[in-house]
Every structure is written in C-alpha cells, then in structure tokens.
Image (tube, helix red, strand yellow):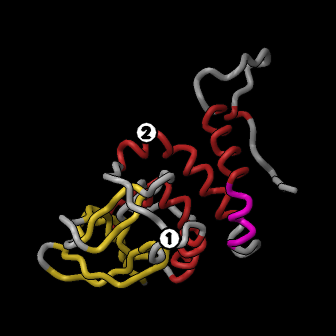
Amino acid sequence: MNSLFFYGTLRHIPLLSAVLGRSLEESEVINVTLKDHEVFAVQDEVFPMIVKGGRGATGLLIETISDEEVERLRFYEGGHDFDLELVCVEVDGVPHEARVFFPASGVERANGPWSLDRWVHDSGDWSVFGAHEELSYFGLKSRETVNEMLPMIRARAMAKVIASGEHCSFSPGGMTTKDVATLSMKRP
C-alpha cells in the first residue's frame, strides 16, 4: 500500500473516489497538516498548487492507496503537469512518509489563497462528472489524447450538472432518471 497526502481538489472525497475508482472508508482518511508548505490558487485555473515554505498545508493522509490507484492518480494529475514527491507529515506526533503531487517547476503560477469550500461550491459537481469520464479512458487512451479532449469533457460535465438540477423539463409519462439504466455507452 502507498501513503499519499492530498491538499487540493482531491480533498473533496467524491472527486477522490471518482479518481480512485472506489469509495473511501471514513477510517482511511486522516486529517493532517504538512508543515513548511502552503497551498495557493493557480493563475487562470480552478485547481490549486502546493509550494515549499509557508504556514502549513491542510490536507488528507491516506495510507491505503494501491499501486493501480497511484497510476490512476498519475493519469488524472498528469493532465496538469503534476508529479509525486516524498514528504513527511505528522499524525499525533508520529512522522509518516507520504507522497504528494507537486506542480512541475515553473509550469504553474501561484495567484493568492485557494479555498476548498469555494471550489466545491463553484466546481465540485462538474469536476466529479469530468473525472469519471477522464478515468473511463484510463488504460485505453494516452494522457496526451485525453488532454486534447478536456474542453469537451468539461462541457459534458457541466451539462450533466445543469441537467441534474431541480428545473428539469416536464415528463408527461412521469419518468425520471431513476427509471433509466445505462446498459452501454460508446463515445465516438
């Protein structure tokens, strides 16, 4: 098993579950702070970045990540030029080694504070839908190919959020999404 520290959008458990391809048990998630690091918004993006130095980065430590889940995370984060580095976090005063996704040097520019709550409100739902689609290509398409698809993935994800709202159109027969099951799907 692998230990990873999550400081940004992947602190949103529905998103992390979508990327991992499984639900997380409450007992797997440990709230910790990574000392001497800080989280900032990324200029012109909805996701944050972590930098060395600062007041501490709040996040989640999960020590039950399988090797395949690490590869799924690399696939997902690879679309944003992030890669894993080793850090040390403390849990009840005991040091734990974990890996964390850092941005490639010079690729992203910090742009002030970042808020998980604000991100969940503004982008959480469509990000989860988008992650489900992105990870449906894991092992089937290259990361580069999926990167080219990101604008359409995002558009479909946002459309799903809108369609799932309470203002859906009238159904004379009374059918709802609960009456429909997807048997198969093929995207051109």
In the image, 80 versus 187, the foreground residue is: 80
**Residue type pointed to by label 2:** His
Query: Which quadrant is home to the C terminus?
Result: bottom right
60 displayed left or right of 183: left
Tell which circle, 1 or 2, labels the residue nearer the N-terminal end.
1
Label disc, if present, on residue 121 of the rendered structure: 2
Residue occupied by mark 1: 107
User: Was residue 78 drawn as part of the magenta stretch in this picture?
Assistant: no
Question: Where does residue 12 sit, x and y in percent of width and height?
Answer: 42, 54
In the image, 129 versus 183, the foreground residue is: 129
In the image, 4 versus 77, the foreground residue is: 77
- Location of residue 24 with respect to 5 vertically, above or below: above
Mark 2 element type: helix
Instruction: Read off the magenta span.
Output: 143-150
**Residue type pointed to by label 1:** Val
What secondary structure prevails in the magenta region? helix
Q: Residues within 10 Å of mark 2 (few under 14, many from 20)?
A: few
- Select label 1 or label 2 by which is in front: 1
- Number of numbered tags placed on the structure image: 2
Question: Where does residue 128 sit, x and y in percent of width and height?
Answer: 55, 51
Residue placed at 36% from the left, 77% from the top?
63
Residue placed at 11% from the left, 77% from the top?
93
Between the residue at mark 1 and the residue at mark 2, the CA separation in whole angstroms equals 26 Å
Question: Where does residue 85 sit, x and y in percent of width and height?
Answer: 40, 82
71 displayed left or right of 98: right
Q: Residues within 10 Å of mark 1 (few under 14, many from 20)?
A: few
Question: Where does residue 33 sit, x and y in percent of width and height?
Answer: 22, 67
Question: Which residue extends farthest right?
Answer: 188
Residue placed at 60% from the left, 57% from the top?
131
User: Was residue 147 drawn as part of the magenta stretch in this picture?
Assistant: yes
Question: Which residue extends farthest left?
Answer: 93
